Amino acid sequence: MAGVKITETVFRDAHQSLIATRMRTEDMLPIAEKMDKVGFHSLEVWGGATFDSCLRFLREDPWERLRALRKAFKNTKLQMLLRGQNLLGYKHYPDDVVEEFIKKSIENGIDIIRIFDALNDTRNIQKSIEATKKYGGHAQGAISYTVSPVHNIDYYVELALEMEKMGSDSICIKDMSGILTPYVAEKLVKEIKNKISVPLQVHSHFTSGIANQTYMKAIEAGADIVDTAMSPLGMGTSQPATESMIASLESSPYYPDNIDFDLLMDVSDYFKNLRKKYEKDGLIKEKLLNVDVRTLRYQVPGGMLSNLASQLESQGAIDKFDEVLEEVPKVREDLGFPPLVTPMSQMVGTQAVFNVVLGERYKMIPKEVKNYVKGLYGKPAVEIKEEIRQLIIGNDDIITCRPADLLEPELDKLKENIKEFIEQDEDVLTYAMFPQVALDFFKYRQSYKYKIDYNLLNEEDKVYPV
Ligand code: CO
């Protein structure tokens, strides 16, 4: 059998997990030529939170980044993470926006699109899979992994089969919280591999300290590809370390083909130095590097733990942290056991904070939670109990169709809105994702002199130089 393949995540998930997605393009390009020759199956470089972070914090055009990376990586496939009908934003987009976004992603250099839905509602990934294939990309259907009374092996096998039938070129088990344990992974991979004929990839996080062992069992059980991150930005809430994972496979039939380990060590040195720079900037938070076993109990992904802490800090209620953590699984159960991944992790987290801080459950309910209960995000794996539904939306109607069927095309309208700022076709998509942030960015772009940290300003101070 051929060795396992490696997807390197240092340019997407690793820095999203450890340094709040702050890695700059200028820090990626100098090492590209070497990385391109290591022999990775693919590099995850785009999507997830990188798009938002580029615009909001780094003042970079995410499309420029993609084009620069494409130019730099002549041999290695480039991969992105896409939230199905939510694309890279936090709401459902109409089909015309989804199709255009995917077309442009592929045109600008993406080869593989990993597509997931937070509820595993396949109606929410259908359009993205279709569009990816239409424009010549590789569509990877991703299962959002969680544990609940209904999320068992049979459920995931069915889901994988359905994704394959929908046209997925490969399937990914996406364990964003690092809760997939080794022997469950072994069984899960075996069962899925028995049923599907496309490659199977495993994506986990080191958060709870078990992902190395999980990968080993998954690989032995037949996983074709695993996701790892260069060690200076690996482990903690990030992926298992690339160098260590590859070394662990030595003298086995699983050792990856065509990996240049010496070159990999050079690449590792580069990131060691880069890490020092981000450490100096105060971006590497100690608590994200430690093993956190709470994730096994609460299923809270690493990023969500730190979000919860900062939400509570800002409300002067950090002493309620443990209580909120206990509340998270209860809210999750109330809401039909959604996997805790964007945007569900934010909804469940915020609701848990409200429930605890206000001293009464569901006294205050975010609009997103109401819309979710109304079915506007799709169908939860378990029907929401009548009493909880009543508490959250009263007698409001619940929709049962594919949520995006209710959305009118809006590309033309969006173009019209920003016509004075358009410098490239992609700008309308940037605007569709994050309207306010995009406008701020476009204005900034028109005047490159404006270099101060925009986000530190008060609203009324946000004036633009002419
Ligand atoms: Co991840």
Image (tube, grey):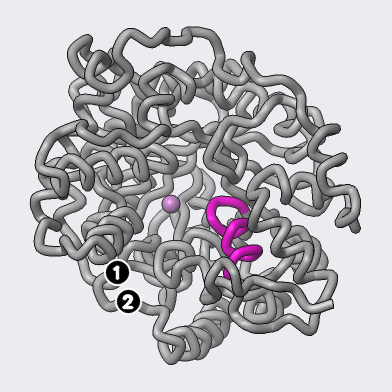
Residue 106 image offset from top left, x and y in percent: 78, 45
Q: How many marks?
A: 2
Residue closer to the observer: 94 or 107: 94
- Place residue 239 in its image quadrant: bottom left
Q: Which mark is residue 157?
A: none
- Percent coordinates x, y for residue 329 in the rendering: 17, 37
Which of the labelled discs sits on residue 285, or is there none?
2
C-alpha span from label 2 to label 1:
6 Å
The kind of residue on which mark 1 rests is Leu
Q: Looking at the picture, how far across and down is residue 112, in whole percent?
A: 66, 44
Task: Look at the magenta stretch and give its main secondary structure.
Answer: helix
Q: Secondary structure at mark 1?
A: helix
Q: Residue at x 80, y 70 (%)?
A: 445
Q: In which image quadrant can residue 246 be found?
A: bottom left
Part of the protein shown in magenta:
47-57
Q: Per the image, is 159 magenta?
A: no
Which of 339/410 is in front?
410
Q: Is residue 204 above or below residue 65?
A: above
Residue at the far front in the pictured view: 460
Q: Quadrant of residue 164?
A: top right
Is residue 198 shown above or below 218?
above
| Labels 2 and 1 touching (C-beta < 8 A) | yes
What amino acid does circle 2 point to? Lys
Q: Is mark 1 within 8 Å of ligand 1?
A: no
Check residue 288 in the rendering and tell me which mark sits there, or answer none: 1
Residue 54: within the magenta?
Answer: yes
Q: Is residue 17 visible?
A: yes
In this orientation, does residue 74 appear? Answer: no
